Amino acid sequence: MTTARASRHAQYGGRVHAQASSHTTTTTERGSFALARCSCGWSGPARRSRDRARTDAADHARTATDPETP
């Protein structure tokens, strides 16, 4: 069995893009309640309103990535 020489392999010349945000939020349903969750481990309160759960997720994503917001 022969192996190809390293010089014969193409070299990657592109850039590696960093992830835009370490906070990726989702909303899930558990019974009649909606929950907002984040990839950082944060979880919002259970809400009967899906819209309010989405607002919780958006608020978390905004405040978690903005260092000037308390």
Image: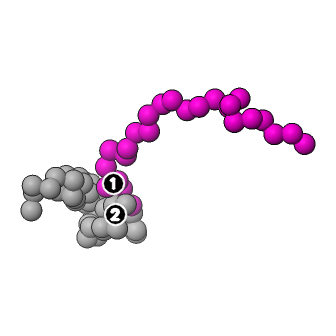
Residue 31 seen in the current view: yes
Residue under numbered circle 1: 22
The crowding category of the residue bearing disc 2, from other C-alpha atoms within 10 Å (few below 14, some 14 to 19, many at least 20), is few
Q: Which image quarter: residue 30?
A: bottom left
What span is colored magenta in the figure? 1-28
Q: In the displayed structure, does residue 13 sit left or right of residue 63?
A: right
**What's the colour scheme?**
one colour
Q: Is residue 20 above or below residue 32?
A: above
Q: Which image quarter: residue 15?
A: top left
Image coords of residue 66 (percent x, y) = 16, 52
Q: Secondary structure at mark 1?
A: loop
| Residue nearer the viewer, 9 or 27 | 9
The crowding category of the residue bearing disc 1, from other C-alpha atoms within 10 Å (few below 14, some 14 to 19, many at least 20), is few
Q: Residue at x 27, y 67 (%)?
A: 44
Q: Name the quadrant of the C terminus.
A: bottom left
Image coords of residue 5 (percent x, y) = 74, 35
Q: Is residue 8 above or below residue 52?
A: above
Residue under numbered circle 2: 40
Q: Residue at x 40, y 39 (%)?
A: 17
Q: Amino acid at mark 1?
A: Ser
Q: Is residue 41 above or below residue 62?
A: below
How far apart marks 1 and 2 lie (CA) works out to 7 Å
Q: Earlier in the sequence, mark 1 or mark 2?
A: 1
**Disc on res. 31:** none
Q: Are marks 1 and 2 in contact (CB under 8 Å)?
A: yes
Q: Amino acid at mark 2?
A: Cys
Image coords of residue 2 (percent x, y) = 86, 39
Q: Residue at x 37, y 46 (%)?
A: 19
| Residue nearer the viewer, 50 or 58 | 58
| Residue nearer the viewer, 36 or 48 | 36
Q: Name the quadrant of the N terminus.
A: top right
Residue 14 falls within the magenta-colored stretch: yes
